[in-house]
């Protein structure tokens, strides 16, 4: 089975509009402990949202991923979110981490605030269709 989150992290790290905003702060699951002290600042976290659908006949799957876009305030979090949304929707049969990302769709965005820290972020759910790549 493909690691779609790893493939997306690698792909987003190659998009200039993303790296200009967040540098290398694109993570799977949660923020690393080392980064917590420097928040709030721009960062992206990708986390599986369940709902996997596998197609055994052609070795592909559709997976939901929650995308958290952090910023210093709501305006900056929105700027990161729009850059991520643009990069995701542009994916068309892109190879990353031995995964072929066929296409990405996404739902609307919510602006939220971490209750304990006050960090502002946007969250949206993306649906990724991906398959294994064939190496020759």
Image (cartoon, rainbow, N blue to C red):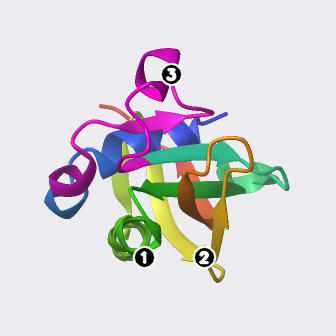
Image mark count: 3
Q: Within 10 angstroms of label 3, few (less than 14), some, or many (20 or more) residues?
A: few
Between the residue at mark 3 and the residue at mark 2, the CA separation in whole angstroms equals: 26 Å
Residue 75, image quadrant: bottom left
Tell me whether the residue at label 3 lies in contact with that at label 2, contact meaning CB atoms closer than 8 angstroms. Answer: no
Q: Nearer the viewer, residue 126 or 26?
A: 26
Q: Is residue 76 left or right of residue 100?
A: left
Q: Is residue 133 visible?
A: no
Residue 28, image quadrant: top right
Q: Nearer the viewer, residue 56 or 6?
A: 6
Tell me whether the residue at label 2 lies in contact with that at label 1, contact meaning CB atoms closer than 8 angstroms. Answer: yes
Q: Is residue 34 left or right of residue 112?
A: left
Label 3: which residue? 32
Which percent across, then down, holds residue 58?
66, 54
Whichever of labels 3 and 1 marks the residue nearer the N terminus, that label is: 3
Label 2: which residue? 106
Q: Extreme top residue here?
A: 34
Q: Within 10 angstroms of label 1, few (less than 14), some, or many (20 or more) residues?
A: some
Helix, strand or loop under label 3:
loop
Q: Is residue 85 above or below residue 116?
A: below
Queried whether the magenta region covers residue 85, the answer comes back as no
Q: Where the C terminus falls, by quadrant?
A: top left
Q: Nearer the viewer, residue 20 or 35?
A: 35
Whichever of labels 2 and 1 marks the residue nearer the N terminus, that label is: 1
Label 1: which residue? 89
Residue plotted at (53% across, 70% down): 104
Residue plotted at (61% across, 78% down): 109
Queried whether the magenta region covers residue 38, the answer comes back as yes
Between the residue at mark 2 and the residue at mark 1, the CA separation in whole angstroms equals: 8 Å
Q: Please state the extent of the stretch shown in magenta in the rendering.
A: 19-43
């Amino acid at each position: 089975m493909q690691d779609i989150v790893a493939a997306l992290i690698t792909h987003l790290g190659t998009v200039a509009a993303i790296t200009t905003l967040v540098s290398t702060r694109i993570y799977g699951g949660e923020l690393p402990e080392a980064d917590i002290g420097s928040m709030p600042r721009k960062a992206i976290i990708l986390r599986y949202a369940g709902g996997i659908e596998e197609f055994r006949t052609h070795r592909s799957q559709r997976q939901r991923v929650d995308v958290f876009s952090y910023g210093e305030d709501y305006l900056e979090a929105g700027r990161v979110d729009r850059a991520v949304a643009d990069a995701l929707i542009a994916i068309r049969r892109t190879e990353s981490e031995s995964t072929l990302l066929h296409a990405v769709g996404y739902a609307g965005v919510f602006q939220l605030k971490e209750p304990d820290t006050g960090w502002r972020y946007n969250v949206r759910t993306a649906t990724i269709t991906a398959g294994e790549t064939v190496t020759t």
